[in-house]
Amino acid sequence: MSTGEAALPRIGLGTFGLTGAGGLDALLSAISIGYRHIDTAQSYGTEENVGRAIARSGILRDDFFVTTKVTAANLGRLEESVDDSLNLMGLGYADLVLIHWPGRYDDPPVSDYIGGLARVQDSGKASLIGVSNFTRAHVDQAIAEIGPGRLATNQFEQNVFLQNRVLADHCRDAGIGVTAYMPLAGGRLDQTPLLAEIAARHDAGVNQIALAFLLAIGSVVIPKSATPERQKSNLEAATITLDDAEMAALAALDRGQRFIDPEWGPDWD
């Protein structure tokens, strides 16, 4: 197990889209159900709601694991932007701060900003640091700049249809955990008979099986849901144990189908 995998709670709540009063209600619901790992980002517009939900919950700040991400537009003012995020959330520190994306078209290069991320950790404003949407080359460049053992995780798109094994293995070999975003393939799981068959066998939902698979291969998952029923079922995926045959069958669903692929993004592994 990598350092990152050991440090991050295995299931978190993604907050993309959880804006406004409805988003705050969804966050409060998730916290009441038992979520303590909450994933936000500067570009989501949900940092303020995350801070409000934590404050209203009555639960100690230190019982939460809060991740936020520095947007590419702020790479030139990375440290100041983290201060902005902490102020928006009303928090003295984040548990994890990530670079959300490498620079658009790789401008600026990793070497220009990764040191600033390390300084955010050194200052105590982030307990852990990491990256998101970094390829193997980006990961290697970051390690070359700030040294091994600094990056807790690389958060990237991963689900049964896009298992990203080459990148995942590269990160884990470097002691970097894997965090899977879009672990439910953007709601595209229901038309997969194999998932339905395995779900029926476990008296579970297809979403739960998809999450259980990622958890079994060692990834942290951060599904987003605004409904209490789905939030609860996603959290309960951690109780499902898949056997070797089921794991092999689910591994065979990998078809390299990427759903998040901006034109300015990296040259994916």
Image (cartoon, rainbow, N blue to C red):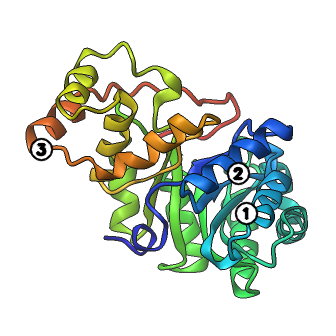
Q: Can you tell which quarter of the image residue 10 is in?
A: bottom left
Residue matched to label 1: 57
**SS under mark 2:** helix
Q: Residue at x 70, y 42 (%)?
A: 26
Q: Position of residue 226 (x, y in %)?
A: 65, 36
Q: Are marks 3 and 2 in contact (CB under 8 Å)?
A: no
Q: Is residue 164 above or below residue 4?
A: above
Q: Which mark is residue 243?
A: 3
Between 181 and 243, which is closer to the camera in this rendering? 243
Report if residue 157 is visible in the image: no
Q: Amino acid at mark 2?
A: Leu
Q: Earlier in the sequence, mark 1 or mark 2?
A: 2
Q: Earlier in the sequence, mark 3 or mark 2?
A: 2
Between 32 and 146, which is closer to the camera in this rendering? 32
Q: Amino acid at mark 1?
A: Ser
Q: Are marks 1 and 2 in contact (CB under 8 Å)?
A: yes
Q: Position of residue 93 (x, y in %)?
A: 75, 77
Residue matched to label 2: 28
Q: Position of residue 257 (x, y in %)?
A: 43, 24
Q: Position of residue 53 (x, y in %)?
A: 77, 57
Q: Amino acid at mark 3?
A: Asp
Cα gap from disc 1 to disc 3, whole angstroms: 38 Å
Cα gap from disc 3 to disc 2, whole angstroms: 35 Å
Between 74 and 83, which is closer to the camera in this rendering? 83
Between 116 and 220, which is closer to the camera in this rendering? 220
45 left or right, relative to 231: right
Q: Earlier in the sequence, mark 1 or mark 3?
A: 1
